[in-house]
Amino acid sequence: MQHTLTLEAANWEQRGISARDAGKHVEAEAHFARSVAEAPDRAISWLGLALSQIDQERISEAIASLYRARDLSPKSGVIGHLLDSLKGHNPARAPESYVNWLFNTYAAGFDNHLARLGYRGPEMLRQLIQQAGWQADSSRAVLDIGCGTGLSGEPFTAFASRLDGIDLSVGMLNQARRRGI
């Protein structure tokens, strides 16, 4: 999804990403609009514009932006999947390229998002394994499938002699490594 990029367009694009990450969707849209005005052949800027429009529930505008992005990057599974989803064509499974993109871009803020939602999964897992009689004696080998950022693996560290995690998203795995999981 890389095309012509001017310093000005890159600046607006980065501002759009930061605003969107902060939940400032109107501001993000304005920044992405400036980016596409500066460099209209950047699929990633059109995608950012579309995501900001989706965040504001302006679906027809998002579809138009996604068509522009798809014209510039026709092989993008991310753009194609979003476009299909918005048009009501929902496959049984999202393409791997979309899942990778989604969780790689979401990795840095994933734990904070779960905290805001009141997510208690890891806490509940710890209670369940203790009820099952597990002792915190580092005697078990544990495999965390779909480990994400390692958040759910944390309750198992005291129980595990070995804790391995697998995930489709390299971004999520990097977060798990930083956490020491």
Image (spheres, helix red, strand yellow):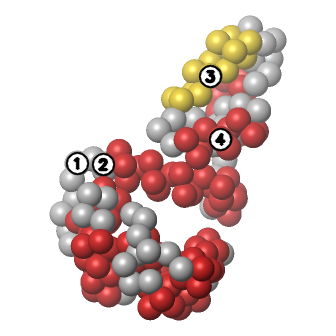
Mark 4, mark 1: which one is toward the viewer? 4
Label 3 – label 4 distance at C-alpha = 13 Å
Q: At x 75% / y 18%, what residue is drawn?
A: 159
Label 3 crowd (10 A; few <14 / some 14-19 / many >=20): some
- The answer for how far apart the CA atoms under marks 4 and 1 are is 28 Å
Looking at the rendered structure, the kind of residue marked 1 is: Ala
Provide residue 8's location: percent of width, then percent of height.
Answer: 59, 85
For marks 4 and 2, the one nearer the N-term is 2
Give, as a three-letter code, the residue at label 3.
Asp
Q: Nearer the viewer's eye, disc 3 or disc 4?
A: 4
Position of 56 relative to 105 (above/below): below
**Mark 1, residue position:** 92
| Amino acid type, label 2 | Pro
Sequence-wise, the earlier of marks 3 and 1 is: 1
Q: Are marks 3 and 1 in contact (CB under 8 Å)?
A: no
> In the image shown, does 7 or 28 lie closer to the viewer?
7
Disc 2 is placed on an element classified as: loop
Q: Secondary structure at mark 3?
A: strand
Q: Which mark is residue 164?
A: 3
In the depicted view, which residue is nearer to us: 75 or 28?
75
The residue at the point 74 percent across, 12 percent down is: 161
**Distance between the Cα atoms at labels 2 and 3?**
25 Å
Instruction: For marks 2 and 1, give the one nearer the viewer.
Output: 2
Give the residue type that dot 4 points to.
Asn
Looking at the image, is 6 positioned above or below residue 123? below
| Label placed on residue 174 | 4
The answer to the question of whether label 4 and label 2 lie on touching residues, with beta carbons closer than 8 A, is no
| Earlier sequence position, callout 4 versus callout 1 | 1
The residue carrying pointer 4 sits among few (fewer than 14), some (14 to 19) or many (20 or more) residues within 10 Å by Cα, namely some
Image-based side of 55 in relation to 157, left or right: left
Q: Nearer the viewer, mark 3 or mark 1?
A: 3
